[in-house]
Image (spheres, coloured by chain):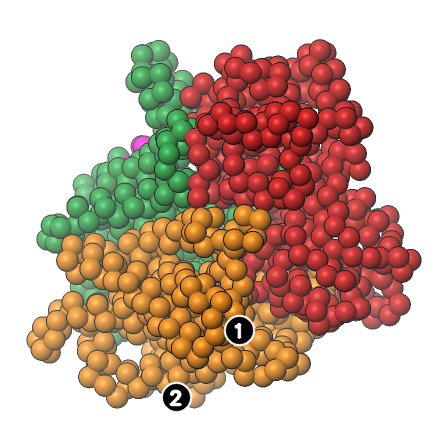
């Protein structure tokens, strides 16, 4: 008899916490098979993926560095997705934030001052907000679907950055290579731990988690977001406009992505490059959902995703596993994480299907 | 059967983990693309494999490393996990390489195509433009329409050097010929590269050369009955009739020499810019379509470059406006070549800035 | 005219992979499911198609293999989102990560191997026509198929009972369920169809467009296809228009560059994206029409026992 899924009367509290554990166990089992096929020791591979990156202070700090942009963007995107606003162009908003923050840093390249970093962060937020505002405006005014506009604008932002790097922003002493000057010390984010790259951006990301949680659970806006997401038509009845929610969530997402962009260039990179982000804006979408669109969940999801990237590098170094294996393993892990949540609302029943329940 | 295979795999893997000798020299490579790109990173990886074979040492590599925040971590991780020499094979790894090198004084670093060095950081690069001179010579002799197409990736000095060297050689043998450049803004998108080739051919180009990674333009040339040059490796399999020759990146000897130097304790920080003479740049065998006199001419150019009697950037050189920039008898210095950002006369269009 | 006809031919090859993938995704979305894994399904179609043509020497076998690969990938997606109620958006993204990785692994020994490309099929009689003949009747099989699919899907969605049911499921799964239709089964089929079409798109890339295998050779075309579905407002003929518009501007900007136009190439490369946005803005102004065509339940999970 096939096991069937049967809807629970009440969501399972235990499964809220147990399902990710189950997912991890399942991914490890799948991973063992995958690594055996690849001809490496499964234990060695799992160690490389999950233990090795966490076994030094530097590794832990790097986890923070890698997770920072994912969490920052993921939190804001989660609010948007909850409201049913499909901003899949955070990558472009991040790029614009990096450009704006970077321009400030380059403008002040020969000056020192405490004011430079706040100005950069402000410019970064502005850049992201401005880019997302185009999406919001086109959506609200012209009804143009944000999936398309935000995605297309990501490509445009990438090309714009490329153009600037080959033109006005390139290092005057850099032999015409497409890199900017290196930022001055005043334009680099302070480190939290000497000898590592962990910077105050990580604290900003934690603050964003707290802020996101506050907005969702304690403010009117949070309530409106939930209403807009579950029944857009009900907005007007509840006394607020749907357009306002679209604007708010898109600008919030754009601002956070822009901030993340500036934090990347002012933190671990330290200059403007033609490629700022290896797809953080897209990965953050996954992070938002794996975190169940809950700010705390996003934090854990961001850390977990970051760990798989670090682990993938370690696996390449230690076991000569091609990077493609990391992709396959990440995919499997995500499948299991996303699917295990079914157990919160459903339980497995062995034997005959309950009559009123449709199974496939 | 399966069970047995699995078991032996586990056993082999367990053994592999257990036998890491401490004194062995280990080399590591950081690639910007996947090794399956059949282009730039692929050729570097061929060098790594040659190194393993020649010296019997262990190597590690990390592929598809983004030129951003991740590079520093990857390089550092390689440095702290027992590697003695680390090759970072893309320009964007320059500053991360230097940062890590500062913290790991005992480890040797080799950065490709950059210009910053340190006591434990060497740079190396290939004079691919020497190969472009040979391509230009062949193209000048073989074009009927006197318009030649150039598919370019990004307007970095290396690509512009290639365009200029090609054009200079082209017009030396055929002053009426011009070069049309199309930028695809990607190192790597076979579809788009092929489209660019088609667009160029439609506009009357009868020879295609490229500074992008995939063999797609050659395939297009083959199917349209025009000629083309390969890039990074011999791409004859993709265009048996169309490929006239190809510039081959050959890092094998450099990698072997440098790792040997580490083993012998003779490694010092150097700035290497090798070309045809040292075999870092090689030419694939001529295609059947290249007539004997053209082969002879091209061979002569190649030999002259190797002997040092011909410099690809020998004056007189005029810029696009027709102004004389390099006088007869002078050459463009290496320092100026490093940052070259202007087109010579005969290139159509302007450099994207 | 000398330039126009060859340019048009190039546009057709550039548009065809977008058209296949977007049509498939449109049918999936019409059933109410948003699958962001197009890129992953496409790249698997590309590698499996290429492996198959290399192993069997038969284009037919290769096309079937690529379709099957797309279907298998789609089945994974369907299993997770329909059976295990996983969220559609991240599951689709995970499918893309998975597909890109798996295709790279499977293709390790396929790098550097050449294939001559799909044969062109001249339609007897028509192919000899001036202009039209060259453009439309001397193409390869997949180009013909892509156009035929536009008509077939249009007919299916708007003229058949099955199409009506599919749209009903996408518009209101609860109502469709109440009427006795199996929402899950219908969505499963729609997802598999989307996978098959993405597989065809991949096959076109690795067998006809640039007949070779290199890692990540889809280069983001799956994402463009996704955007085109939205652009088309879920209508097959408009998908055709969108794919040819995007492909057309991509090619024309290359031509403009070759003509020596003085605009930075990066700006030229932005044009297809900007034009798509612009046209979307112009055609989106009629809200009622969008409401009529957009599947109302898109992206929403279906819990049958509610």
Image hue for chain B? red
Helix, strand or loop at label 1? It is helix
Which numbered tag is attached to residue A13?
2
Circle 1 residues within 10 Å: few <14, some 14–19, many ≥20: some
Labels 1 and 2: the sequence-earlier one: 2
Q: Which chain is home to disc 1?
A: A
Report the front residue among B322 and A243: B322
Relative side of C32 to A308, left or right: left
Colour of the chain lettered C: green
**Gap between marks 1 and 2 measured at Cα:** 49 Å
The residue tagged 1 is: A185
Q: Is residue B50 left or right of residue A298?
A: right
In magenta stretch: residue A282: no
What's the residue at 23%, 46% (across, down)? C278
Chain appearing in orange on the rendered image: A
Residue B16 appears at what percent x and percent y? 81, 65
The region drawn magenta spans: C146-150
Which of labels 1 and 2 is toward the front? 1
A216 up-or-down from B133: above or below? below
Find out whether the residues at labels 1 and 2 contact each other: C-beta distance under 8 Å.
no
């Amino acid at each position: 008899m096939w096991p069937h899924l049967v809807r629970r009367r009440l969501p399972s509290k235990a499964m809220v916490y147990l399902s990710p554990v189950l997912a991890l166990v399942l991914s490890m089992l799948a991973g063992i098979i995958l690594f055996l096929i690849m001809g490496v020791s499964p234990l060695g591979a799992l160690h490389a993926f999950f233990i090795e990156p966490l076994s030094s202070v530097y590794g832990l700090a790097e986890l923070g560095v890698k997770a920072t942009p994912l969490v920052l963007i993921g939190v804001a995107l989660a609010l948007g997705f909850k409201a049913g606003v499909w901003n899949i162009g955070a990558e472009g908003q991040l790029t614009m934030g990096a450009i704006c923050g970077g321009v400030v840093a380059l403008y002040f390249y020969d000056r020192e001052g405490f004011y430079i970093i706040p100005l950069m962060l402000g410019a970064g937020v502005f850049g992201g907000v401005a880019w997302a505002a185009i999406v919001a405006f086109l959506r609200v005014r012209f009804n143009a679907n944000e999936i398309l506009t935000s995605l297309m604008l990501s490509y445009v932002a990438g090309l714009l950055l490329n153009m600037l790097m080959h033109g006005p922003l390139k290092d005057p002493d850099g032999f015409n290579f497409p890199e900017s000057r290196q930022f001055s010390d005043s334009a680099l984010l302070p480190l939290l731990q000497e000898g590592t790259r962990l910077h105050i951006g990580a604290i900003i990301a934690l603050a964003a988690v707290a802020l996101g949680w506050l907005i969702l659970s304690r403010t009117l806006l949070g309530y409106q977001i939930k209403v807009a997401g579950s029944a857009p038509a009900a907005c007007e009845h509840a006394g607020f406009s749907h357009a306002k929610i679209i604007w708010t969530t898109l600008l919030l997402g754009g601002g956070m992505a822009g901030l993340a962009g500036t934090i990347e260039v002012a933190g671990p990179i330290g200059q403007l490059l033609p490629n700022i982000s290896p797809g953080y804006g897209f990965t953050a979408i996954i992070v938002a959902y794996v975190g169940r669109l809950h700010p705390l969940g996003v934090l854990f999801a961001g850390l977990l995703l970051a760990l798989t990237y670090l682990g993938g590098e370690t696996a390449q170094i230690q076991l000569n596993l091609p990077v493609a294996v990391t992709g396959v393993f990440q995919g499997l892990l995500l499948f299991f994480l996303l699917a295990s949540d079914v157990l919160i609302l459903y339980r497995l029943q062995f034997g005959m299907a309950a009559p009123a329940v449709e199974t496939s | 059967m399966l069970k047995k295979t699995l078991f032996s795999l586990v056993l082999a893997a367990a053994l592999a983990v257990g036998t890491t000798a401490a004194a062995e020299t280990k080399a590591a490579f950081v690639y910007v693309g996947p090794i399956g790109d059949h282009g730039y990173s692929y050729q570097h990886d061929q060098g790594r494999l040659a190194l393993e074979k020649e010296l019997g040492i262990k190597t590690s590599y990390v592929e598809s490393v983004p030129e951003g925040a991740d590079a520093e971590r990857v390089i550092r991780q390689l440095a702290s996990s027992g590697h003695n020499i680390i090759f970072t094979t893309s320009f964007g790894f320059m500053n991360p390489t230097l940062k890590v090198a500062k913290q790991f004084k005992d480890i040797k670093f080799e950065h490709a195509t950059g210009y910053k060095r340190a006591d434990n950081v060497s740079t190396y690069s290939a004079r691919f433009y020497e190969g472009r001179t040979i391509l230009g010579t062949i193209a000048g002799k073989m074009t009927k329409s006197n318009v030649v197409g150039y598919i370019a990736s990004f307007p970095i000095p290396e690509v512009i050097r290639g365009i200029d060297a090609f054009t200079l050689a082209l017009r030396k043998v055929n002053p009426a010929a011009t070069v049309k450049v199309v930028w695809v803004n990607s190192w790597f998108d076979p579809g788009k590269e092929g489209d660019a080739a088609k667009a160029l051919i439609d506009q009357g180009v009868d020879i295609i050369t490229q500074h992008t990674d995939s063999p797609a333009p050659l395939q297009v040339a083959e199917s349209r009955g025009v000629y083309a040059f390969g890039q990074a490796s011999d791409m004859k399999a993709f265009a048996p009739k169309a490929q006239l020759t190809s510039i081959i990146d050959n890092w094998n000897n450099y990698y072997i020499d440098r790792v040997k130097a580490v083993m012998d304790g003779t490694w010092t920080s150097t700035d290497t810019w090798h070309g045809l003479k040292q075999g870092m740049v090689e030419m694939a065998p001529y295609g059947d379509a290249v007539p004997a006199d053209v082969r002879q001419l091209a061979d002569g150019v190649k030999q002259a470059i190797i002997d040092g009697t011909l410099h690809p950037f020998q004056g007189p050189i005029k810029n696009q406006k027709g102004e004389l920039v390099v006088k007869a008898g002078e050459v463009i210095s290496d320092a100026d070549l490093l940052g070259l950002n202007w087109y010579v006369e005969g290139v159509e269009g302007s450099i994207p800035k | 005219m000398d330039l126009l006809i060859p340019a048009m031919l190039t546009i057709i090859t550039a548009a065809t992979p977008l058209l296949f993938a977007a049509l498939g995704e449109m049918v999936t979305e019409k059933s109410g499911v948003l699958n962001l894994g197009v890129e992953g399904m496409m790249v698997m179609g590309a590698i499996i198609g290429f492996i198959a043509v290399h192993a069997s020497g038969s284009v037919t076998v290769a096309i079937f293999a690529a379709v099957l690969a797309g279907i298998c990938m789609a089945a994974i997606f369907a299993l997770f989102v329909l059976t295990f109620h996983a969220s559609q958006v991240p599951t689709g993204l995970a499918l893309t990560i998975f597909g890109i990785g798996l295709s790279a692994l499977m293709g390790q020994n396929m790098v550097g191997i050449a294939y001559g490309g799909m044969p062109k099929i001249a339609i007897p009689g028509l192919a000899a026509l001036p202009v039209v003949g060259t453009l439309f009747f001397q193409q390869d099989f997949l180009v013909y198929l892509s156009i035929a699919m536009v008509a077939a899907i249009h007919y299916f969605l708007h003229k058949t009972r099955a199409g009506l049911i599919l749209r009903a499921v996408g518009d209101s799964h609860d109502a469709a369920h109440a009427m006795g239709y199996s929402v899950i089964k219908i969505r499963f089929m729609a997802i598999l169809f989307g996978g098959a079409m993405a597989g065809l798109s991949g096959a076109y890339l690795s067998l006809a467009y640039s007949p070779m295998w290199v890692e990540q050779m889809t280069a983001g075309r799956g994402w463009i296809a996704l955007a085109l579905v939205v652009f088309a407002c879920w209508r097959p003929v408009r998908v055709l228009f969108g794919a040819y518009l995007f492909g057309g501007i991509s090619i024309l900007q290359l031509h403009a560059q070759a003509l020596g136009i003085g605009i930075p190439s990066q700006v030229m490369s932005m044009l297809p994206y900007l034009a798509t946005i612009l046209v979307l803005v112009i055609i989106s102004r009629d809200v009622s029409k969008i409401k009529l065509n957009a599947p109302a339940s898109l992206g929403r999970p279906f819990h049958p026992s509610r």
